Amino acid sequence: MSLEGKLILGIDPGTVVMGYGLIEIKDNTPRIRHVGVVKTAGYNNHYLRLKHIFIRTQALIDEFKPDELAIESPFYGKDIQAMLKLGRAQGIVMGLALQRDIPVFEYAPLKVKQAITGMGRAAKEQVAYFLKNMLKVDDLPLELDATDALAVAICHYLQMKNPVSKAGYKGWGDFVKKNPGRVK
């Protein structure tokens, strides 16, 4: 399966700031097509923020027509109300993609950071620094939510290149278990 020309929209969901990053695969290399943030700070009502996220995400999908959507899953914190609000925003984005038959892939923050920096507990600033070097670009947006979304898209690209993930294995251990004659 060729990845050439594939468009991946990465989303870092948030109810105050939602990051997005669109990459295109050219010559087996991810290239940045668009990156930015959706801000909802001007809305005092949570439901109006969700409406704004809906409208802006719908516009992004309609404008860029991504082939796949990669989204960061919420991490489990102590603030249950914040988790619920974040889950609602994530659900809106996922629902819009699914409604347009765009496959959705979800990645835990630790997996994204591990894929980009090699360290699952890397700071957002470290992720941005590694992305700059990995993608060989001079400038990235200052908003760390935007670079986090770009990292989600790159993480998905790296997972698609991984033959273990393409074959439906859960990891190398699963591969070895299902293919005992192929590994010595």
Image (cartoon, rainbow, N blue to C red):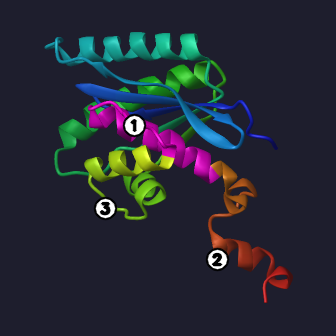
Disc 2 target residue? 173
- In the picture, the disc for residue 121 is 3
Q: Decide: few, some or many residues near mark 1? Use Cα within 10 Å; few <14, some 14-19, many ≥20.
A: few
Observer-side mark, 3 or 2, equals: 3
Q: Quadrant of the C terminus?
A: bottom right
- Distance Cα–Cα, label 3 vs label 2: 23 Å
Q: Is residue 13 visible?
A: no
- Distance Cα–Cα, label 1 vs label 3: 25 Å
Q: Is residue 115 left or right of residue 182?
A: left
Up/down of 143 relative to 80, above or below: above
Q: Secondary structure at mark 2?
A: helix
Q: Are marks 2 and 1 in contact (CB under 8 Å)?
A: no
Mark closest to the chain's N terminus, 3 or 2: 3
Q: Is residue 94 visible?
A: yes
Q: Are marks 3 and 2 in contact (CB under 8 Å)?
A: no
Q: Is residue 77 left or right of residue 148?
A: left
- The amino acid type of the residue labelled 3 equals Arg
Between 99 and 156, the one nearer to me in the picture? 156
Instruction: Identify the magenta region.
Output: 135-159
Up/down of 172 relative to 55, above or below: below
Residue drawn 31% across and 61% down?
Answer: 121
Q: Decide: few, some or many residues near mark 2? Use Cα within 10 Å; few <14, some 14-19, many ≥20.
A: few
What is the residue that sits farthest to the right in this orientation? 181
Disc 1 target residue? 138
Q: Is residue 105 left or right of residue 17?
A: right
Residue 136 at x, y = what percent? 48, 43
Mark closest to the chain's N terminus, 2 or 1: 1
Q: Secondary structure at mark 1?
A: loop
**Marker count (numbered):** 3
Residue 166 at x, y = what percent? 72, 54
- The amino acid type of the residue labelled 2 equals Gly
